[in-house]
Amino acid sequence: MTVNRRALIYGGAGLIVLVLVILAFRPRPVDVEVAPLRRGAMSVAVQDRGQTRVLDRYVISSPLAGNLERIPFQAGDAVKQGEVVARIAPSTLSVVGGRQAQAAARQAEATVGEAAANLRRAESRANLAAKEHRRLIVLRASGIASQELLDTSRADYEGAVRDVEAARATVAQANAGVASARAALLALNQGGAGTVEIRAPLDSRIFGIPERSGRAVLPGDPIMTLGNPHEIEAVIDLLSEDAVKTTVGDRA
């Protein structure tokens, strides 16, 4: 009877140890989120850091040597095309100054010709891009062209249109440069009487002014930088695994 009792005790102890081992190594439940399953559209986004910059900036420079009056504008102010943004009282005419003014006027006129030629080329490219895009629209509707080709043509056309707008702004800036150079030459020929008005070449905002206070300037000294903050581009370096997920025409 003593043996049976001892065996019963050992057996109970072993059973308890076995239960404890089973409980210790039993898989524990994992918390999960449960949601109803439904059919719908899925969107995939790629995120990364980058830099934004203005597509076109325009630096207004002094067309002659003289005294620049205090600039009444600040960075961030909006200006209209043709608005006077600075005034310069020219220095007394000298042989060197006269030659420099004449050279500046000729250079400004040459810049206008070059800008006009660039505008004509940009307009030709835009016309070709528009024709190609219209052709691919028809082919896509017939199931011949792929959506990727259509998206690429649309991006090419939109880029060509932006190039035309930038070229037109460059022509406007060049014309403003010619007007300033001729006004400077006229003021010098009149012995430095009066002031030369510097006008904005296009509707824009002032991005930077090196010095607002009145000061002496030489030909080519920067006065202010203009640009359109609504026309910007983003430069983002994507990883290869993210770059393959993006295509031309994606919204950003």
Image: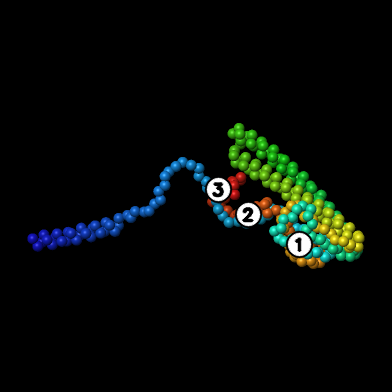
Q: Which quadrant of the structure image shows residue 71?
A: bottom right
Distance CA(mark 2)–CA(mark 1): 34 Å
Mark 1 = which residue? Answer: 72
Say which label, 2 or 1, has the lower sequence index. 1
Q: Which quadrant of the structure image shows residue 97?
A: bottom right
Quadrant containing the N terminus in the rendered view: bottom left
* Amino acid residing under circle 3: Lys
Q: Residue furthest top?
A: 142
Q: Is residue 91 left or right of residue 119?
A: right
Is label 3 in contact with label 1 (beta carbons under 8 Å)?
A: no
Mark 3 = which residue? Answer: 245
In this picture, is 251 found above or below 181? above
Q: Position of residue 6 (x, y in %)?
A: 13, 62
* Amino acid residing under circle 1: Pro
Answer whether residue 191 is visible to the viewer in this image.
yes
Q: Is residue 13 left or right of residue 83?
A: left
The residue sitting at 74% across, 42% down in the picture is 124
The residue sitting at 74% across, 60% down in the picture is 73
Q: Residues within 10 Å of mark 2 (few under 14, many from 20)?
A: few
